[in-house]
Image (spheres, rainbow, N blue to C red):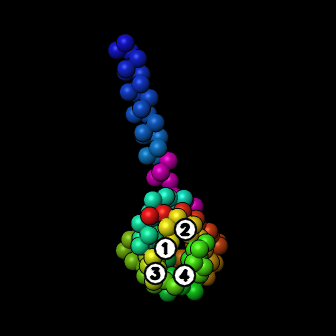
Amino acid sequence: MKTLISNVAISFIFIFLLNKIASAAPINAFIDNVTPPQNAINVNKSSNIDIVFVQAMNASTINSSNIKVFGLQTGILTTSISYNAGTKTATINPSNDFKVGEKISITLTSGIKTGTNAAILQLLSHLLLSH
């Protein structure tokens, strides 16, 4: 019985550590992580969206011309976007709350440049938001 409990405990710890390692990996070559996470549910409808980049970005290119937010129920959303160079984080603040259960798409265009002025690839991120 002790062996069974030990094996279950070891398996649980292994799975936990594996999930931690997997979640620490960047999303792609340009984005480290997003908050709320991709495909999240039960997200507060007034949430901001944070995108943490892997490298320093050209702050002048982190703007609403290069980052588009689209709600399946509301269409293109008006947003204010700021960039914190210290944390390499773009914060997207929608002018209005999302609708309950609304699927949100975020498009980062190739107009966004790294700190060395290299264009990123066009990226699309989906978030499922519900209240």
Q: Residue 64 at what x, y percent from top left? A: 53, 85
Look at the numbered discs 4 and 3 and tell me whether their residues touch, using CB distance below 8 Å.
yes
Look at the numbered discs 3 and 1 and tell me whether their residues touch, using CB distance below 8 Å.
yes
- Secondary structure beneath label 2: loop
Q: Residue 105 at what x, y percent from top left? A: 59, 70
Q: Residues within 10 Å of mark 1 (few under 14, many from 20)?
A: many
- Secondary structure beneath label 1: loop
Look at the numbered discs 1 and 2 and tell me whether their residues touch, using CB distance below 8 Å.
yes
* Distance between mark 4 and mark 3 Cα atoms: 8 Å
Residue on which disc 2 sits: 102
State the extent of the magenta-drawn residues as a range. 22-29
Residue on which disc 1 sits: 98
Q: Residue 65 at what x, y percent from top left? A: 57, 86
Q: Residues within 10 Å of mark 4 (few under 14, many from 20)?
A: some
Residue on which disc 3 sits: 96
Look at the numbered discs 4 and 1 and tell me whether their residues touch, using CB distance below 8 Å.
no
- Considering the whole magenta stretch, tell me its main secondary structure: loop
Q: Residue at x 62, y 68 (%)?
A: 124
Q: Residue at x 59, y 81 (%)?
A: 76
Q: Is 107 situated left or right of 50 in this image? A: right
Q: Residue at x 37, y 12 (%)?
A: 1
Q: Residue at x 44, y 29 (%)?
A: 11
Q: Is residue 9 above or below residue 28?
A: above
Total marks placed: 4
Q: Nearer the viewer, residue 40 or 90?
A: 40
Residue on which disc 4 sits: 77
* Distance between mark 2 and mark 4 Cα atoms: 12 Å
Look at the numbered discs 2 and 4 and tell me whether their residues touch, using CB distance below 8 Å.
no
| Res 118 label | none
- 24 magenta-colored: yes
* Distance between mark 2 and mark 3 Cα atoms: 13 Å
